[in-house]
Image (cartoon, rainbow, N blue to C red):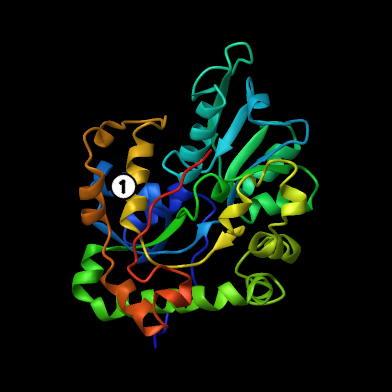
Amino acid sequence: GLTVERPTLFRGWSQIAEAFQAGQVDVVHLLMPMTVWLRFGSRVPLKVVAWDHTGGSALTVGKPIANIEALAGTTVAVPFWYSIHNAVLQLLLRNAGLTAVTTGEPSAAERTVKLVVMAPPDMPPALANGSIAGFIVADPFNAVAEVNGVGRILRFTGDVWLDHACCVVTVGEEAIATAPDVIERVVTAVARAQLWARDNRIEAARLLSADGDNYLPQPRPAIERALSHYDLAEYGPSGAIRHPDWKTGRIGFQPFPFPSYTEALVRLLDETLVEGDRSFLEGLDPTAVHRELVDDRFVRTAIARLGGPAAFGLPADLSRREVIEP
């Protein structure tokens, strides 16, 4: 029941944050850690009202890189400092005895890996020309590297942190206060689209591509791969999938923002190297962060209207325990 303009496409996360802060866009698809940074670091009055997708990201590397340890002395790109990608990458690096750095040159002898922020569309070309050894980001950019033969997936992030949120639906507090009915319709529309996409992945890829409504500039084969290709026979032997018992997929769609995830994310961000002032992270109470950051009233209504938690494969009590196994 909403009449809206076509979504605005941005190439990088900084531009989205700036446009949102300037009031140029009202509803934004943001990296979940970005919302923590904006709310508590920059004091932007925003609320997370739903999740967009779970999983859907990977660490993609050049073909000579055989394992995480082989990244010592190389440069790896992340999409933004405050991203699940940066946090999970550094978790993997620590687990392998490697140290992330953001300045100077990386050293194989010192087992350091240099991290740089790069716009996602620039990542596959940078990997192809050898200026980076790998990148960690959401699809379809990992799939683009696969389809173009310039890289391979070393690890799916959803195989490190089960059903983690990547991006979330974010709105300003003023919009919630002045037009709650509109926000409720937006969240219901997103949830309905998620429910449809779960069972219509190939058609969703067509609609997103130039063969359909042309929302994404990537080729349709890459978009299809991003939405549906999670082959254990292919990815199991390489170690990209290490937890087949999790019974997850390459990307998932469900709207509920679990408090346990926000809390675990805040704790992980406290251990994550970023550039700039990170003092706001010190002393943050993970439970209080969720209460202040997230407003789940609209998504609870949407889930109830669309068949209840079971329709999205969610537990009836909408609670869970986080599973993180690097």
- Locate residue 34, reporting x and y percent: 38, 48
Corner quadrant of residue 247? bottom right
- Locate residue 144, reporting x and y percent: 71, 53
Badge 1: how crowded within 10 Å, few (<14), some, or many (20+)?
A: some
Question: Who's the residue at 65% across and 51% down the image?
Answer: 141
Outermost residue on the front side: it is: 245
**Direction from residue 61 to residue 104 in the image, left or right:** left
Q: Nearer the viewer, residue 17 or 142?
A: 142
Q: Nearer the viewer, residue 293 or 128?
A: 293
- Compared to 175, does 83 lie above or below? above
Q: Nearer the viewer, residue 118 or 319?
A: 319
**Any part of residue 71 in sight:** yes
**Any part of residue 5 in sight:** no
Quadrant location, the N terminus: bottom left
In the picture of the structure, the residue carrying the numbered disc 1 is 263
- Locate residue 63, reporting x and y percent: 77, 36
Question: Who's the residue at 74% across and 42% down the image?
Answer: 151
SS under mark 1: helix
Q: How many marks?
A: 1
- Locate residue 118, reporting x and y percent: 56, 40
Identified by mark 1, the residue type is Glu
Outermost residue on the right side: it is: 149
Corner quadrant of residue 21? bottom left
Outermost residue on the bottom side: it is: 1
**Direction from residue 257 to residue 144 in the image, left or right:** right
Question: Who's the residue at 61% across and 59% down the image?
Answer: 249
- Compared to 195, does 224 lie above or below? above
